[in-house]
Image (tube, rainbow, N blue to C red):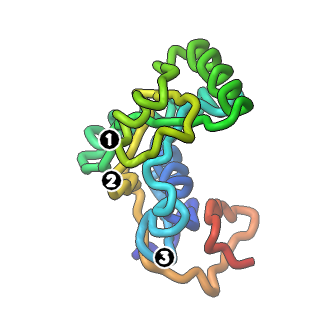
Amino acid sequence: MKTRARAIVIGGGVGGCSILYWLTKLGWADVVLVERAELTSGSTFHSAGLVGQLRGSLALTRMMMSSVELYRTLGEEVGLETGWREVGSLRLASAPERMEELARQSGWAKTFGLPLELISPQEAQERFPLMVPHEIAAGSHLSSEEGVRAYKPPCRPNGAGYSSPMAMDGWSCREPSQKRWCRPVQAWARY
């Protein structure tokens, strides 16, 4: 394990792995990620497969679309299986207000060229046979959204390292003006 690094990323979820990836893409080779347990075993594990592109703002939608473009090629780039699978997403409406929301989302999706189609309850059940369609008024399906099985983002490109599991107790910096760390941890953070 490294004892010195230019930057330390604390937290090995999708956020921490992404930060490590982009630091190395910027040429930072002396970086390390530390995780309290296994990579992607915290909040990322609980939301694996939820990489929806259509968001409530222009900036978030563009960011998610860029992420999807990266995920499509990431495994080949770093030589690891990522578990990336594009399976689509299903949104359902059982109230008039939710139906209006789906119609707005359909227009928003067209703005970005995302293939969202409004579908009937029967079409929704064809895509997800376990649902009970009698309480559903309408639905939408976005075929290019993603699902992931055992998603573990590769985070060792360009010489970066990670340590897992690892406690950060007693971490210090000899030159406080040079301290660079990022803490993208979520549910497991202790302050």
Amino acid type of disc 3?
Thr
The alpha-carbon separation of the residues under discs 2 and 3 comes to: 34 Å
Q: Nearer the viewer, mark 3 or mark 1?
A: 1
Which residue is at a point 56% across and 62% down the rendered structure image?
9
Q: Which residue is mark 2?
A: 149
Which residue is at a point 56% across and 53% down the rendered structure image?
15
Placement of 120 over or under 154, stated as above or below: above
Placement of 172 over or under 162, stated as above or below: below
Q: Which residue is mark 1?
A: 85
Residue 164, x across and y down, in percent: 42, 74
Amino acid type of disc 2?
Arg
Which residue is at a point 46% across and 28% down the rendered structure image?
141
Which residue is at a point 52% across and 47% down the rendered structure image?
23
Disc 3 packing (10 Å; few <14; some 14–19; many ≥20)? few
The alpha-carbon separation of the residues under discs 2 and 1 comes to: 7 Å
Residue 127, x across and y down, in percent: 36, 35
Assess whether mark 1 and mark 2 are in contact (beta carbons under 8 angstroms).
Answer: yes
Q: Earlier in the sequence, mark 2 or mark 1?
A: 1
Secondary structure of the residue carrying tag 3 is loop
Q: Which residue is mark 3?
A: 3
The alpha-carbon separation of the residues under discs 3 and 1 comes to: 37 Å
Looking at the rendered image, the quarter that the N terminus falls into is: bottom left
Amino acid type of disc 1?
Arg
Secondary structure of the residue carrying tag 1 is strand
Q: Earlier in the sequence, mark 3 or mark 1?
A: 3
Name the image quarter holding residue 54: top right
**Residue 44 vs residue 27, the one in the foreground:** 44
**Residue 104 vs residue 161, the one in the foreground:** 104
Name the image quarter holding residue 138: top right
